[in-house]
Amino acid sequence: MTPEMRTPRLVCLTGFMGSGKSTIARLLAGALGWQNVDLDKRITDAAGLAIPEIFARWGEPEFRRLESEQLARVVAEFQETQKSRVVSLGGGTIGQPQNLALLRENGAVLIWLRCPVEELLRRCAQITDRPLFRDEASFRRLYEERLPTYQLADYCVDNDIDPARVVERILALGIFPRVTV
């Protein structure tokens, strides 16, 4: 790696619900020896409530406010410690312009975990705690609404296989130091 090519130190995984962000982030952080931060977990810890409860009690606007607040804390911690980390974002995190701007301003690399909508539907159909998954039509509509935002990511990696293989695909992007998985 040439000196002008700097290794990213703040990597954020984005993608629609069911795309495997939390799982892939955990595996990628482990492979790199970096910290793993799950933004949804940070939100639930801060609120003392599960995400469906936050939506039920306070609605999506309050959830988005909490999400932005916790993302700002994650970025501030990174700036303070300079410890490399992999962050799994929520499916709608970068859809908020201030969140995307914050990540860009702080040198975050965004990786979109792309997955066919049919596969996402299959994965999410089994999960009952997704407040924004009401029915197939609204699921597809939300996916289409968010697609242009995901396409703003720096990299796109297909997540249509085993999570360990997806991590291999991310490592093969050539933006990290050599790692053996």
Image (spheres, grey):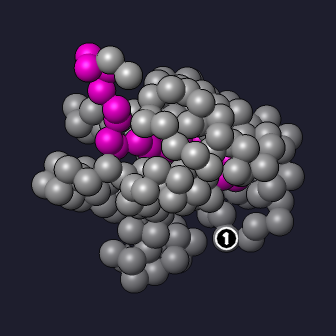
Is the residue marked by circle 1 packed among few (<14), some (14-19), or many (20+) residues within 10 Å? few
- Counting from the top left corner in percent of width and height, residue 67 is at 37, 57
Q: Quadrant of residue 112?
A: top right
Circle 1 SS class: loop
Which residue type does callout 1 highlight? Answer: Asp
Q: In this image, 126 relative to 21: left or right?
A: right
Q: Is residue 67 above or below residue 108?
A: below
| Residue occupying the point 86% across, 52% down | 122
Q: Is residue 141 above or below residue 61?
A: above
Q: In this image, 170 relative to 7: left or right?
A: right
- Give the number of callouts: 1
| Residue occupying the point 32% across, 17% down | 2
Q: Which residue is mark 1?
A: 129
- Counting from the top left corner in percent of width and height, residue 20 is at 66, 52
- Counting from the top left corner in percent of width and height, residue 127 is at 76, 67
Q: In this image, 171 relative to 114: left or right?
A: left
| Residue occupying the point 47% across, 24% down | 154
| Residue occupying the point 80% across, 55% down | 123
Q: Nearer the viewer, residue 102 or 168?
A: 168
